[in-house]
Amino acid sequence: MKKIILAFLLISSINVIAQEEESKKKLSISGSVDAYYQTYLTAPDNQSPAFGTAFADQAGFAIGMANVIASYESGKVGAVLDLVTGPRGAGATFNSDIIDGIVNQAYVYWNVSEGTTLTFGRWNTFLGYEVIAPAANFNYSCSYLFSSGPFSHVGLKADFALSDDVSLMLAITNPWDTNNISTTGEYALGAQLGYSGQYLNLYYDSGNNGGLGFEIDYTGGFDLSDDFFLGINAAYNDNDGSGFYGAALYPQLAASDSFSLGLRGEMFGFHGDGDDLPNVLGLTLTGSLVVEDNLIIKPEIRLDSWSNSMPYFDNDGAPSDNLAAATIAAIVSF
């Protein structure tokens, strides 16, 4: 009887260990799908070019993107595969070939210790306030700052949690938005210092072959009250004496549990040789209505006004320095 009981306990303990090991392995699926309707208020809907920022640049009914993210974790290691399709996904990945055109992110990671994580592969950029997936942005259209910087990096990064409030990231990657390999033998360096939700970002590549050069970027925000949040983004870029600069404020007010209203006010311009280089003031007012837990409706009004440039047309077909549009978007996350 003792031997039977001992064997039973041994088998039970093996089952418990196996179940515990199995419970450490986690596979999750998430993603989003979005579509929108956009009409220009100051120009014909066949206006070309559009605002000149990334994504959401079609008139009439259009789709944004659909993405599916598979995340796997087993103990201290894991992997993420983020597949995208649609115009927004093609723009984010530069649609360089039939495979790369649908891969937004693909990376493996190793939690070396409680405060250190290594990530190897392709991951979305650490620069800027906005991101590729519209479900994670308050405004549906994108800023000039986000549109001008890199969307993704291919390389190796190390994240360090130095304390509860302080974090550090160091990265070595292929040059700006080179999503396959570095064909020039050049590489880029990146760093991020974080403190209590405020981030100072640095990026550098040689600037050759269409590279970005040097960029310093601040991203952060403050809860000014329980219902009012102020987001901030500012950046300066230089590539051999020319580049861009800008700043954007993102005040957001939660009017109720299901509806919020936010404004993006952005100043963006270029520096370099020559006088009176163009700059733009962009104002974007966005509402965010949560219809269900995973459905968000976003009505949006946007007005961009340029100085020293007339990149648009008005309703009579004459060159214009401003463009206004009305947009309504629907986003489902899962």
Image: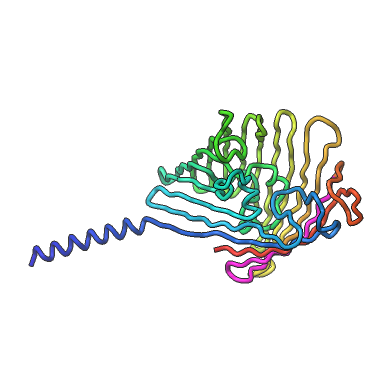
Q: Main secondary structure of the magenta part?
A: strand
* Residue 305, percent from left and from top: 84, 50
Residue plotted at (81% across, 42% down) = 279
Q: Nearer the viewer, residue 34 or 2?
A: 34
* Residue 29, percent from left and from top: 49, 59
Residue plotted at (74% across, 56% down) = 58
Residue plotted at (84% across, 57% down) = 44
Q: Does any portion of residue 126 appear in the rendered image?
A: no
Q: Does any portion of residue 246 appear in the rendered image?
A: yes
Q: Which residues are magenta?
A: 288-306
* Residue 227, percent from left and from top: 66, 63
Name of the residue lying farthest toward the front:
98
Quarter of the picture holding the N terminus: bottom left
Q: Could you say which quadrant of the image residue 194 lies in?
A: top right
On screen, residue 139 versus residue 279, left or right, reads left
* Residue 104, percent from left and from top: 56, 49
On screen, residue 97 versus residue 279, left or right, reads left
Q: Nearer the viewer, residue 321 or 260?
A: 321
Residue plotted at (64% across, 68% down) = 290
